[in-house]
Image (cartoon, rainbow, N blue to C red):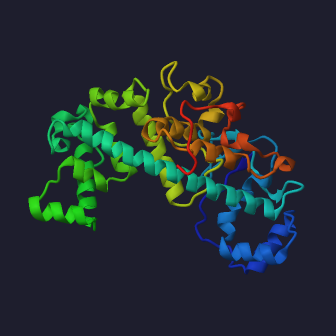
Amino acid sequence: MTQSDGKNKQYNKPWLSYAEQLNILKSRGLIVTDDSKALEYLQRIGYYRLSGYWFPFRQRSELCCILPSNWTGKKLKNHRIGHIALDEFKPGSCFQNAVELYVFDKQLRLLVMDALERIEVAFRVDISHTLGRYGPFSYLEPERLFQDFAQAINQKTGITDHQVWLQKQAQMINRSKEEFIRHNKEKYGLPLPIWIACEVWDFGTLSTLYDGMSQQDQDEISSRYGISNGRVLASWLRSLNYLRNVCAHHSRLWNRNIVDQPKKPDKGEAPLFNQAWQPGQQHILARVFVLLCVIQHLLNTSNPNSSWWLRLKQLLQKFPDLAHIGLDLKGMGVIDGWEQWSWPQTPKDGQ
């Protein structure tokens, strides 16, 4: 048994020069073929950012019982069985491999953000148009929304989730420097009609409002995307919002565990990647490839002529050769046979 690391009461690790950092990596078995380039990367990217990419290169302990950091020797209540990452690297691990994986991950984040921007814009229109038919200020009316969202008091905030959402939107409107926002505020005052207010929403704001819409209105929007159950689409938007936050903060993406996982669509819906939701493939569900498939499914409706999937395919085929340390696209949850997938529309280059 081993005890997991907890928070140190007093941080006692010393400051290290870039050369000292590199020497530590070498002493642990990481191959460095060009010291000057490695030092340049440490200086430009940083040790701890790169450490997320060489973490999979580290050797693992035998299977053991991992104890909580606050264990006092009494009866175990919270523990898990697993492998602990050791300081030493697997044979053949190379500093340049970590850099290549970092560059791949950066390109993946940029590609994902490009798609999420298109989806965000499309859903602003979907939501504002659907609610706007009830009136320009229907988003203020609790009776138009899901009861739990609009009327139930959140025990943490003391107000409804709808009121929390309205506060956030009001802050966005007040902070906005857009000329059309200033013009409408000066000419017509507040509140703004939903088809104008929606232009300040970020992905989290629109996904929260969609989550709070009535089932009927959710289903109407989701049906445009070939999904019969609007609650499934709500889970997709929550997952994509998590994905967007990872990308926006320049965090490691390629093998990240997806905390807020999407729900499975009904049988026959999203058929090209529905196998990713099959029983026994939870390891795939927890990885980013499922969300890349969700993105493509939504782009099929919101931007049907996009070449996004083609560009994604080209990027995935450039994944660094890390077979010598046991890493490949399966770390992303990529499904066998994905290269043969074809989408209904023929993509046009540059879109």
Whether residue 287 can be seen here: no
Query: In the picture provided, is 166 more to the left or to the right than 301?
Result: left
Marks counted in the figure total 0
On-image quarter of the N terminus:
top right
Q: Please state if 211 lies on the left or on the right of 71 as rendered.
A: left
On screen, residue 269 above or below 167: above
Q: In which quarter of the image is residue 92?
A: bottom right
Which one is nearer the viewer's eye here, 218 or 119?
Answer: 119
Q: Where is residue 350 in the image (x, y as percent from the top left)?
A: 56, 51
Q: Residue at x 68, y 60 (%)?
A: 103
Q: Is residue 137 visible?
A: yes
* 31 over 142 or under it: above or below: below
Residue 15 lies in what quarter of the image? bottom right
Q: Which residue is at 17% across, 41% downward?
A: 138
Question: Residue, x 48% and y 41% (percent of image)?
Answer: 239
Residue 77, given in percent of the width and then of the height, sits at 59, 39
Residue 50's x, y, as percent? 69, 64
The answer to whether 109 is drawn above or below residue 276 in the figure is below
Q: Residue furthest top?
A: 267
Q: In this view, does 255 lie to the left or right of 293?
A: right
**Vertically, is 304 above or below 276?**
below
Residue 115 horizontal/vertical position (percent): 50, 48
